[in-house]
Amino acid sequence: MKKAIVIVALLALAQLAHAAPAFQLEMNPIFSCEPALFCPLFSYPQGYQLLMNVEAVGTDAFPATDYTGTVVFTSTDPSAVIVPSSHTIAASDHGVTSVAVRFYRHGLQTLTGTDAANHLSGSAGVSIDVHSLIDVHSLPTITRAGDLSGAWYDPYISGQGMMLDVVPNGDGSANVFGAWFTFTEVGMILEAYPVWFSFQGKMASLNEGGTILDVYATPGGNFDAGPAVSAKLIGRATLQFYDCSSAQFAVSMGSDYLNRRSLDFFTAGGSMYLQRLSAEAGCNNASPPTPSARGFSGTWYDPSTSGQGLLFDVSATNGGWLFGGWFTFSSDIYGGFQWFTLQGPFPLAGNEADVPVYVAKTESFLSTKSPPNGETSTHQIGTAHILFKSCTDAELDFSLQDGVKATGSIPLKRLTPVPDDCR
């Protein structure tokens, strides 16, 4: 079966350079233009991050999941930033991958993918406005570690969100690590189940406020027990901060971790317009950081059970508040993933507190459906005591009921560098 590489751009019509006439390309939107940009006629500001799918299809217009080959990406814009610049689609990719691009030359620009060995190519075009992304938005000026770190969520997506750990490197760049808690899709027979993913990448320029991330799934672990498990690369995402309290996350995953309709491979994609959950003063504050419990925020884990862990956000909200995401496993859930949230008062001058532990009522992947009859999207299933012994060591004691029924203690080590405001 003849195959062709098809690059589908967001809100842009793709054009195949070497496809049989029988092919007809359709738009496959991964995310729409951020509302504040008012993008007319598929036009985007200079520097805007576009996430595109790359998919192999046959002459029958069905996905060619057995395709393998190396695709090299080029652009009509010599200053474009393309990540990755080439990619080998392996058998495990099922004919699907994704690529992120920033265009800086205004006018109609094209991204082309070419598999020279198999004589295949495809392209996608978008219009780039003369205005830059910096002209449109007041992008953050990052002066302190953790300025953009914390809990973020889309208010239109029920009971789902992510924890970010953004660590400046001192040279204008920053490392980004995060965990995203969501659900599988609702299947024809099976219900949706909890699932979580991790992601990481490097923000080359804090002034541009954006980065391209690798997305991972970590299957096969056990709740609060070994052995350590490894993450598997399953997709790519873009994260763009627009200011200190709003951002956009777009993702494309060629993975069966979300598909419960059948065992068939498929591509999942979507976007979230994120808001910061905690009420911080803002990341444009150039004053020196004041040491407080805020510095306990970050990524923590038990090295003996690597592959699972917690991300904490300690903020000045309500006079002192802790929000935590606990990313772990459960043998009682189809797929084996489980996640909880911890949230409650935390003394800014202290180092420990008792906080409730919550579990979300099951929705589906990026669902905007609200809980029925005024119900909340989460309910408490236990309590936890968190003690930060130092900026690098902590301990979590927990008691869970309501189906989980587990008690224990987890010694924690900080995974990412110690922030400036940790005392």
Image (tube, grey):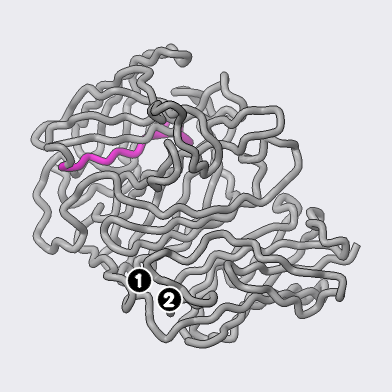
Start-end of magenta stretch: 303-316
In the image, 236: left or right of 154?
right
Q: Going from the N terminus, do you reach mark 1 or mark 2 first?
A: 2
Q: Residue at x 42, y 71 (%)?
A: 38
The furthest residue to the front: 373
Residue 13 location (% of width, % of height):
66, 73
Q: Is residue 142 above or below residue 408?
A: below
Q: Secondary structure at mark 2?
A: loop
Please tell me how crowded label 2 is: few (under 14), some (14-19), or many (20+) other residues with Cα within 10 Å: many
What residue did someone put label 1 on?
A: 208
Which residue is rendered at x = 73% and y = 56% of the image?
90
Q: Is residue 285 magenta?
A: no
Q: Which residue is mark 2?
A: 47
Q: Amino acid at mark 2?
A: Gly
Q: Are marks 1 and 2 in contact (CB under 8 Å)?
A: yes
The residue that appears at 32% across and 29% down in the rendered structure is: 342
User: Whole-Å distance between the Cαs marked 1 and 2?
Assistant: 8 Å
Residue 292 image offset from top left, x and y in percent = 12, 42
Q: Nearer the viewer, residue 183 or 255?
A: 183
